[in-house]
């Protein structure tokens, strides 16, 4: 019953955003997109949102694709992605809640901690040097990847099959999600670090998927709604994010659900290393920009 209530909340949020979006779309939709841009947006978002459902994240890859292939006006890419991807991740949250077991108290506590971090922790996160944050988190992800590899290879104990946290582990998990919620507001994704934290706390890595999708979508709900209401999105572009992204998510979620635990562990390692490299690259670019 509790699971159905949580799923209902996410479905209601998706419907609410859809209504607000389509009201604006009717009045403001653009008619200057070519057939190549339409096809490009659908194909790109099918792939990148599928990767998002695998834990890799869609923001950076979609931005890069849209810029390279000139699919949207550069000024509207970020607001459009924020609002459109938020709707897709609501769908991801509902799917993963249905297909992956997670204890409800753990789920609710970690979602609440993430939202609280996004509301309260943002003021602290913005005071910290973003370049330094990216480097520190990148190093932490590499270390976490090493521990997971060591566990898979039998060099040391680690991981587990638990679907919930209790006692001090729940406190650590909530504290970690609070921090990740704050970092999300300054552009640092929560997927990879949430995966690492779930694994290192002895849980089944699959449990990370409903937790991170539920946390991330609600954290972005407010900003996505604001971007839509203020007309900052590219209306047709956002429509194609949702239409292209949802099928990609459905396919990727089926892959995750049927993936053996051993393979899933290696997927987590790949995601952590990929995200760490991305963080180091972004930090390097920031350093170059400051020098200029």
Image (cartoon, rainbow, N blue to C red):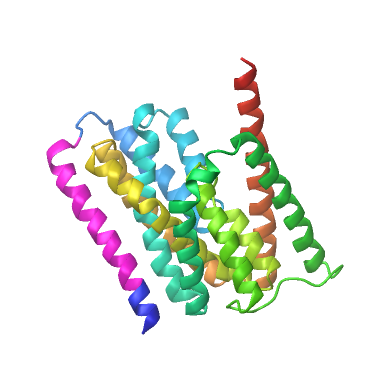
Q: Is residue 248 visible?
A: no
Q: Position of residue 200 (x, y in %)?
A: 70, 66
Q: Is residue 108 left or right of residue 236?
A: right
Q: Is residue 38 visible?
A: yes
**Among the 4 quarters of the image, the one containing residue 88:** bottom left
Residue at 74% from the left image edge and 50% from the top image edge: 142
Residue 5 position (above or below residue 192): below
Q: Quadrant of the N terminus?
A: bottom left
The residue positioned farthest toward the right in the image shown: 155
**Among the 4 quarters of the image, the one containing residue 127:** top right
- Majority secondary structure in the magenta region: helix
Query: How many labels sit on residues?
Result: 0
Q: Is residue 260 left or right of residue 146?
A: left
Residue at 58% from the left image edge and 78% from the top image edge: 163
Residue at 24% from the left image edge and 61% from the top image edge: 15
The residue positioned farthest toward the left in the image shown: 27
Residue at 65% from the left image edge and 46% from the top image edge: 274
Of residues 205 and 202, which is closer to you in this image?
202
Q: Position of residue 26 (x, y in %)?
A: 13, 43
Residue 279 position (above or below residue 147): above
Q: Position of residue 265 (x, y in %)?
A: 68, 65
Residue 96 position (above or below residue 135): below
Of residues 202 and 53, which is closer to you in this image?
202
* Magenta segment includes 185: no
Give the magenta range: 7-29
**Among the 4 quarters of the image, the one containing residue 172:** bottom right
Q: Quadrant of the C terminus?
A: top right
Q: Position of residue 101 (x, y in %)?
A: 52, 78
* Magenta segment includes 13: yes
């Amino acid at each position: 019953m509790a699971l159905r209530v949580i799923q209902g909340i996410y479905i209601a949020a998706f419907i609410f955003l859809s209504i607000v979006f389509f009201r604006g779309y009717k009045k403001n939709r653009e008619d200057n997109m070519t057939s190549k841009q339409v096809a490009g947006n659908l194909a790109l978002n099918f792939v990148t949102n599928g990767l998002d459902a695998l834990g890799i994240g869609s923001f950076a890859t979609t931005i890069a694709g849209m810029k390279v292939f000139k699919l949207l006006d550069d000024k509207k890419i970020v607001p459009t992605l924020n609002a459109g991807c938020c709707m897709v991740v609501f769908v991801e949250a509902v799917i993963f809640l249905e297909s992956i077991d997670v204890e409800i108290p753990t789920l609710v506590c970690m979602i609440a901690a993430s939202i609280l971090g996004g509301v309260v922790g943002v003021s602290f996160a913005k005071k910290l040097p973003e370049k330094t944050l990216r480097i520190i988190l990148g190093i932490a992800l590499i270390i976490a990847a090493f521990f997971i590899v060591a566990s898979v290879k039998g060099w040391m104990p680690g991981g587990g099959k638990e679907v919930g946290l209790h006692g001090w582990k729940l406190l650590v998990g909530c504290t970690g999600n609070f921090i990740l919620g704050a970092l999300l507001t300054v552009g640092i994704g929560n997927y990879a670090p949430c995966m690492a934290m779930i694994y290192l706390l002895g849980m089944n890595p699959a449990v990370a998927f409903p937790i991170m999708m539920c946390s991330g979508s609600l954290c972005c709900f407010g900003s996505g709604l604001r971007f839509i209401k203020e007309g900052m999105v590219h209306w047709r572009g956002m429509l194609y994010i949702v239409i292209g992204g949802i099928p990609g998510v459905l396919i990727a979620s089926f892959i995750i659900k049927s993936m053996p635990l051993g393979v899933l562990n290696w997927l987590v390692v790949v995601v952590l290393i990929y995200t760490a490299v991305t963080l180091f690259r972004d930090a390097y670019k920031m350093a170059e920009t400051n020098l200029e």
